[in-house]
Amino acid sequence: MRGQFRFQKDYVYKMPVHFSGFAFYPVRVTHGDMTAMLVEFETDENALARLIPEDFELLRPVVTVQFANFRDVEWMSNGEYRLIQVSAPVRYEGNSEGLEGVYPLIIWENKACPILGGREEDGMPKVFADVASERHVGDHWFTAAGYENCTFIKMHFWKQADLDETTVKLMNQNRVTNNFGWRYLPDLGKGGASLSHATLYPQETVIEQGASGEARIDWTELTAEEHPLQAGAISRLANLPVSRYSGAVMLKGYALLNVGDSRILP
Amino acid sequence: MRGQFRFQKDYVYKMPVHFSGFAFYPVRVTHGDMTAMLVEFETDENALARLIPEDFELLRPVVTVQFANFRDVEWMSNGEYRLIQVSAPVRYEGNSEGLEGVYPLIIWENKACPILGGREEDGMPKVFADVASERHVGDHWFTAAGYENCTFIKMHFWKQADLDETTVKLMNQNRVTNNFGWRYLPDLGKGGASLSHATLYPQETVIEQGASGEARIDWTELTAEEHPLQAGAISRLANLPVSRYSGAVMLKGYALLNVGDSRILP
Amino acid sequence: MRGQFRFQKDYVYKMPVHFSGFAFYPVRVTHGDMTAMLVEFETDENALARLIPEDFELLRPVVTVQFANFRDVEWMSNGEYRLIQVSAPVRYEGNSEGLEGVYPLIIWENKACPILGGREEDGMPKVFADVASERHVGDHWFTAAGYENCTFIKMHFWKQADLDETTVKLMNQNRVTNNFGWRYLPDLGKGGASLSHATLYPQETVIEQGASGEARIDWTELTAEEHPLQAGAISRLANLPVSRYSGAVMLKGYALLNVGDSRILP
Amino acid sequence: MRGQFRFQKDYVYKMPVHFSGFAFYPVRVTHGDMTAMLVEFETDENALARLIPEDFELLRPVVTVQFANFRDVEWMSNGEYRLIQVSAPVRYEGNSEGLEGVYPLIIWENKACPILGGREEDGMPKVFADVASERHVGDHWFTAAGYENCTFIKMHFWKQADLDETTVKLMNQNRVTNNFGWRYLPDLGKGGASLSHATLYPQETVIEQGASGEARIDWTELTAEEHPLQAGAISRLANLPVSRYSGAVMLKGYALLNVGDSRILP
């Protein structure tokens, strides 16, 4: 008997396709409870630019490492996951819109489900890592991430002062961040791409409270034996020179992921 | 400064693209140590055909549920992962080659890394689940898989007799299985596909020893609250009628994944 | 050379003893952020009494199943762990103090560290299970626990009304719960005990907010093959008849574990 | 109603006591499939002796770090767990038997069940850690262990030559190793011990094949914030000077744990 599954025109599917299919609607999901740690450092412009596709202009030679513990994740029945994202500020030059935002160099997440969606539906460079929950003793907050019990990053934050209301209000004036990605699928059985294009994935963050402080990122490079898939990426990031730590905050709030506003950038 | 990363023509990339890129070569990786449990049952032809794209002919109304514990996985530094795959025998009718093989309806795997590669490079319907290692008491072998501590499948195998050498030799005469997939990426910000096509992913299995026996699959349906992403798929599979268990084996051996032979099926 | 490690009189040690040793002080630790779900049901008095040592009087034939997600656990650098505890209300009759409290029949916890301390330092019947974080869709909250991917308990709570201030205040008037345990170590190489006695472990809970509602406990019995160590205990609990669900609340607050007030009950 | 649970004289119990109880018999369990890596180094005699109770004579200033991946663990339905044990060769001087064996300084295990039994029934200094499965690329084998994603030990082994039959036979002539422990329970609510004594726990290992090679142990000290319970122990071990790596083998075989032969040492 012939297979009976047929794709519906203009429906949206996910692999496994034959279990899915629904009319498009602009999905907008809430990550209701976000605890984040953001650490910014200045680095060498050339070294950083080598990690950014030529369709983007690097706006400042600055790297942001962001840890986020997301709870009350709506599409996961208000479950939770955690990530560490490394990004740089860019402007998309592939068209005339002059869109500015951040280009994530890598996003480590501790659950497969958001990784699949992020890669396939938004071109986000998500990969797996065990990412620990944030812990703290007094005002010293910290977390770590690893692969097969090999730690490759530790983040430290020493809280110094709560953000005042004016600062929080100011941060909330620009709630939407343009996240740029590069969605890519290889061709099969030969070189070249089946699909390769820039993406725009706007995310909205609302800050409820925050604190500023000092921070430090400690990388531990892994060997290609320890982490065959990511040792290279970790090494490239670990070797970005840190000229100066230029800012660090901890934030509590929530995020709105406007998946439906994602688009392919021409 | 402009981004300095440029794609090389005919190179192969993975997301995050800017850390990757190498000349194509036909990757062939060994899963050096495979312990597998295969359970086959006859089912309703119409119900099963509804899960198979119309480019495929369902050859027999038969479902195979396969657990595999892969160790000595070459590309993971000889590490390990586990899967449970549900598949049906099909012939690809989208061209005149008359290719026969199996169409996996779903493949649950307990690590994100093989999931990403399988989906993006081969169109395999891989999704995440916690898949337990096989255990046994005497000749009763069993395993289970779940999501967020909600078990949705248990597999049982009662070993009865070792496979004799002739049988094993026979099984090894057709070492290559054609796995068919459907690689799909949605368009962004609207319905429809960015990419949607059948794939062929040949896999080679060498059996070293085996046993036949009796088996049983126990499904536990989950609510959409318990498993927002997969409750539907689990329910569809759990409700495929079992007319008769038609075969069950445990196998030890190894597998060769001929990733380089994967191709897009026109 | 002779070993140089010597026990100091009146010091406190934990295994491995030679790395430890400190003067006694009344440890009091805060679990700063507690999310709990408590479900009470009436059961058969005889069946329940068979699970309670004869030094205790069962006060009411009532079982409380409590899930707790502890965050900001002070002694874990404000990390987290989760538990499911099943208990009954009792009075200790082994002496004339007339102490009333609860006798936990079992406490499943998802981390080894609190299990070791609880068993060895307080006689609490803690054992390991994977205990999921609570999730919810609307007012339906749920969690589950399992072992090697075999779910054995699911808890559901449907929130109906927030607790009013008076109720919360009332609940906080008796903040201290007497938890009774039975600390037991077997003799080695023969039957009998090296140590066997009742314990008292007072715990303090402060409620900040709460809600009442409907609840349900769903047990899935496991075979002795699936869970060699606990199948019997799970079965005994799963088979306690539920005459009536007699109360269900969700609570947010914090807990103070007065480890230093623990004592051996004569 | 009074509790109905009564201890039977000479029965053996485990916490939770009221679910347990059986007549003593000399339990002997098989760990049917062991893959082990043993690394020996010479160290400073005084530093090492400080970690050994004065009832033991340190025989040689030598430390053995042993990784073991146990599969086919009989009492776990032939499931699996992993450990890293650090031990020293000693003679028990607390009586006149002249028993020689090893004193484990610490045993990290990745599952709670064997930890509880080992501590309570044998006085073994078992504590929790995430212990990775062994992996290898060519002849370089490695593993790692950590806590909350903070790696504290990495073990490397470079295989050089298979052990010949004579060597293996020789190793199997003394299959039984005396493991000494110190079983300790604190008193409650004040300093001092409820129970404190040396233990003997004989273990039998049968080697089927092996290889010798070079090895290295890399410690990463953790802060008390990262690992409140074990930072001190890790630091003491990490700071034992390594005068010379004096031997390294990988072994395949099986183990027999003669739990019933365990005894309290007078």
Image (spheres, coloured by chain):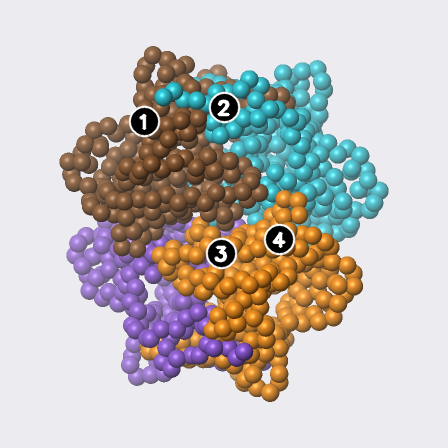
Chain colours: A purple, B orange, C brown, D cyan
Q: In which quarter of the image is residue D108?
A: top right
User: Which label sits in the foreground, 3 or 2?
Assistant: 3
Q: Nearer the viewer, residue A78 or A3?
A: A3
Tag 2 subunit: C
Res. C60 mark:
1
Q: Mark 3 points at which residue?
A: B219
As shown in the figure, which amino acid type bears the numbered disc 1?
Arg
Residue placed farthest to the top in the image?
C96
Mark 3 neighbour class, 10 Å CA radius: few under 14, some 14 to 19, many 20 or more = some
Report the residue at 62% width, 50% height from top: B141
* Same subunit: marks 4 and 1: no
As shown in the figure, which amino acid type bears the numbered disc 3?
Trp
Report the residue at 47% width, 38% height from top: C234
Q: Which of C39 and B253 is in front in this view?
A: C39
* Same subunit: marks 2 and 1: yes
Residue placed farthest to the bottom in the image?
B96
Q: Quadrant of residue D243?
A: top right
Q: Where is residue C99 in the image (x, y as percent from the top left)?
A: 32, 19
Helix, strand or loop at mark 4: strand
Q: Name the residue under label 4.
A: B157
As shown in the figure, which amino acid type bears the numbered disc 4?
Phe
Spatial distance from mark 2 to mark 1, Cα to Cα?
Answer: 26 Å
As shown in the figure, which amino acid type bears the numbered disc 2?
Tyr
Spatial distance from mark 3 to mark 2, Cα to Cα?
Answer: 40 Å
Q: Position of residue B124 (x, y in %)?
A: 53, 70
For the residues bearing labels 3 and 1, Cβ distance under 8 angstroms = no
Res. C184 mark:
2
* Same subunit: marks 3 and 1: no
Mark yes or no: residue D65 visible: yes
Mark yes or no: residue C80 visible: no
